[in-house]
Each structure stands twice: as structure tokens, then as C-alpha cells.
Amino acid sequence: MFRNSVLVLFIVYLAAVSAVINTPLYKRRFAKERQLLPQPPLMSNETFWFTQLVDHFDPNNDETFQQQYQVIDDYFDGTGPIFFFLAGEAPMGFFNFQEVQIWNWADKFNALYVVLEHRFYGASNPTNDFSTPNLRYLTSQQALADAANFLTSFKAERGLESAPVVVFGCSYSGALSAWFRLKYPQLVVASVAPSGPVLAQLNYTGYYSQFSNSAAPDCVAAAQTATNQIMALTTSKSGRDQLAKTFNSCSNLENPRDLYYFLYTLTEALGSADQMNNPPTWGLNTTCQTLTQTSSLLDNWAQIVAGGQTGCQDYSLKSFIDSMRKTNSKDQDGSRSWLWQTCVEFGYFSTTYPGTSVFPPTLNVEEQVKWCEEIFDIKGMTPNIAWTNSYYGGQQIQGSNIMFTNGLLDPWHLLSVNEPNLEGTVQAATYEAGHCGTLIQSTSIDPPSLIAARAQKLSQFNEMHTLIRFPCDNVEKRGSWT
Ligand SMILES: *[C@@H]1O[C@H](CO)[C@@H](O)[C@H](O)[C@H]1NC(C)=O
Ligand SMILES: *[C@@H]1O[C@H](CO)[C@@H](O)[C@H](O)[C@H]1NC(C)=O
Ligand SMILES: *[C@@H]1O[C@H](CO)[C@@H](O)[C@H](O)[C@H]1NC(C)=O
């Protein structure tokens, strides 16, 4: 998420978070959601440290680092399964509100709940800083190997070798969860992968095109009208000055790259409102209400960008790049790490082209790829999408006992799996809400499709129950998980 709009959110959440989250495309709006939604019950969430290999793929490198994990044993009866949550692109515990249902399921199945922090996020730093040479140890493959190494040692250390494990995640870590079952099927009996974008994509026009399907027609029309007004103003100096004034810019918008970043920030603030559109807050409705509250659409949009913050907005691209170039881990909050992963493995650059969305149609992929090069000082840097998709299989992911759930109002469902495969070994359920909706706290106004998606998961756990107790006797059952 970009700094300007994010800064706004973070002023409010600073007490809970150590620094300003700067991540471009992924963590949009979660901060607001995080504040409004219930967290899991506070329990014996003891934190431990695991001595982890820095590089799993170089046999000559025996360097180690301390990786953080958490064990919640309140529900564990000594014989139940292990529910293993892979934390994603933030400090472990930051996405707690997206784990509430797992706690409930752990209760129901007397499970031991274990959370592993992702390398290069939170306190789990393999290297002393986040310089470009050090970031070579930050890949999803290394993260999966961390999880495998950790899980094997943890089970041995606690005498839980025979306990079956179900792996969980959400969002990026939802994809990791699916990939963990794919690549290490002997370690986990099943994967739950809510909102996991398993398809890497460079030119992600879907992110902003989704808005037209998620928002109410009057809101979509207002966004288009406002965009037309903005684009007309960008063509003259006086128009750009007017835009700078309306959107409270700290500086003028004469540099074309600042103008790009300005339009990017505006688009992000409004166009990502569908991602976290979950009950009970239904954030998209609130954003749309703000956009349409008066006929001064640009003033309304500016209010959405400001998000309650007063003071001018920094739309300078250089400020953004400079903040992302800082390599001291104390100056970073996960944003540089996540940007690295998108620049190396996933892309996910949200773009707009004429006819693809109701937002300014100037956000091309080339400019965003250039940011990778400038931030990490690697000439010609561009994510290797083809490798990522051939390594994991994209939306044709193979494997078994993998369950996806996706919100149809959330753009990320476009890069996930929304239909079961023919063999029934990969399951999928969709529902009418946003990101990771199946894992957040239930509310009295949940749409029936969301209730059903949660129930489908639960029924699959029930189905797996015999399998969880006697994993070796049910090999066949594992194949058909419906
Ligand atoms: C663990 O629980 C404490 C309260 O008991 C809470 O303050 C803390 O944030 C929790 N830590 C994590 C990582 O969830
Ligand atoms: C990105 O997608 C848009 C819309 O489909 C297309 O017009 C554009 O050429 C694509 N750009 C690249 C670099 O693939
Ligand atoms: C949100 O907006 C949609 C579409 O306008 C509407 O159907 C729904 O009832 C609204 N939800 C809330 C909680 O206001």
C-alpha cells in the first residue's frame, strides 16, 4: 500500500504497529479492518524462537537466524491435530483478526495451534539488514523450507511426531499454505488457503477492473465521472494546479512521474475499497457513501485519500522511492520486503489501461517495474512470473486436500482458485464478501454464501476427522475430499 494513503491509516494505528506500512498492492485497507474487527481471544500465546537455516538451498552455508513462533495450547488435549498457521507479509500476530475462525476450529478439534512468522518480517530477520544482497534469501521457496524444517523439528521436540497437521494461511500466506501441501505433502494432511493468489501476474488490470463489479452502479458511475474530470484537468498547468490544491498536495504535479504517482495514490485510495469489504463494516459502502455525498466528486475523493488526516499529502515519487531504499530494518516495516517479493516472484502490479477500469487509464506496468530497478539497484529487474507459475502451477495447482475460499467482491479472487478441480482434490468455495472473509469473526449480518463457505470448511474438517485421527489408514479418503 502506498505511503500517502497508508500514512493516513497508520497515524491511527501507530499504537499497534511499529511503523508505517508502505506495501504497494497487498495489505490495502487491512489496518482499518484490523481496528474494527474483533481479535482472537487472548490466550497462552507464548512466543518461542527457532534456530533456522538462513539458506536451505546452499549445502555449504550453515548460518542460522532466530525465527519467531507462537504456540497456543489452550484447546489441545494431547491427541488432537496441529493447526499450523503460516504468517505472511507482516509481523506475526498482525493479521490476528483474520485467524479468529481457526481458533474456533482449534477449540472444536482440540487442536494445538502454532503460528510461524515469515522470514524478513516482524522479528524474524535472517540478516542484519535488508540490503539487496541480503534480500536474496527472501523467497517463497525459502519460506516454505523454513516451515518444513520448523515443523519437523517442533514435532520431534514435543513428541508429537504422529499428530496430523493442517496448514492454514490467508492472502499471500493462503497461497503459501496451498503450496506447502503441494511441495511437502508428507508433512501436512490438508491445506486451508483463503484468498490465496496462487497465480503470479505482472500486469494485474483485474485489481481495478473488479471495482466496477463490486461497487453499486451509482458509485461506479461517480468514479468514472470523477476520473473524467481529473483527466481533463491533467492536460493543463492550471488544471494540475487545481488538482494539487483539491487533493492537498505538498508540491506541484509538474513532474510526469509525480503525476503518475499522484494518480496511482488516488486510484489506490478509492479503487481498493472492495478488497476488505467484509461484514460488519462493509467498507466499500462507506467509501462509496463518501464519494457520492455531494456533487463535488473531487472534493469527496480527496476526503477518501486523506482518510481523516489533516496536513498536505506527499505525492512525490522520489519520497516513496527513497523511503523504500532504506536498508536498515529499523526503518522498515515489511514494505521493502514485500516489494522485493513482488519484484522478484509475483508482480501483482495493479494497472489501468483505457477501458479496463473507471480509474485514470494511465497506470501502465512499465513505470511500476521501473520502481523495482530504482529501489533495489538491479538493472533491468523484473519479476520472473513465468518461473513462479511453472514452479507452483498457478491456478492449475495440483495436489490434494487443498481448500480455497474466496470473496467475489475481493479483486484477489481473480488470481486464486474459485472452482474445484475435476478430481475433487482441490476444493473451492466462493462467497459474497471480501478478503479472507471465512477466517474473520462471524457476525449476525453475514451473507448466506459466507456462512456456507465457512460451513463447507468445517464439514471438510469433520470429514477429515477420521483422517486426522488415523492419517495412515485413510489414504484413499484423502484422495476424494468431498
Ligand atoms: C499475545 O497475547 C498478548 C496478551 O496476552 C497480546 O498483547 C499479544 O499481542 C499477543 N501476541 C501475539 C503475537 O499475538
Ligand atoms: C497490460 O494489459 C493491458 C490490458 O489488457 C494491455 O493493453 C497492455 O498492453 C498490457 N501491458 C503489458 C506490458 O503487457
Ligand atoms: C452495501 O451496499 C450494497 C449495494 O448498494 C447494499 O446491497 C448493501 O445492503 C449495503 N450494505 C450495508 C451494510 O449497508
Image (cartoon, rainbow, N blue to C red):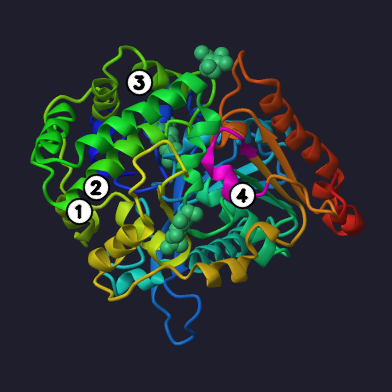
Q: Relative to residue 33, is residue 420 depicted above or below?
A: below
Cβ atoms at labels 4 and 3 below 8 Å apart: no
Q: Is mark 1 within 8 Å of ligand 2?
A: no
**Mark with earlier residue (1, 3):** 1
Identified at 36% across, 55% down, the residue is 364
> What amino acid does circle 1 point to?
Arg
Ligand 3 shows up in the quarter that is top right
Along the line of sight, the residue nearer the viewer: 106 or 432:
432
Residue 82 picture location, percent across and down: 67, 48
Q: Secondary structure at mark 1?
A: helix
Identified at 34% across, 50% down, the residue is 363
Is 428 displayed left or right of 172 in the figure? right
**Mark with earlier residue (1, 4):** 1
Q: Is residue 459 visible?
A: yes
Residue 421 picture location, percent across and down: 79, 53
The magenta stretch is 406-417
Which one is in front in this view, the residue at disc 4 or the one at disc 3? 3
> What amino acid does circle 3 point to?
Leu
Q: CA distance from mark 1 to mark 4?
A: 32 Å
Q: Label 1: how many residues lie within 10 Å, few (<14), some (14-19) or many (20+)?
A: some
Residue 291 disc label = 3
**Mark with earlier residue (2, 4):** 2
> What amino acid does circle 2 point to?
Tyr
Is 144 displayed left or right of 359 in the figure? right
Residue 257 disc label = 1
Q: Secondary structure at mark 3?
A: helix
**Mark with earlier residue (2, 3):** 2
Image quarter hosting the N terminus: top left
Q: Is mark 3 within 8 Å of ligand 3?
A: no
Q: CA distance from mark 2 to mark 1?
A: 6 Å
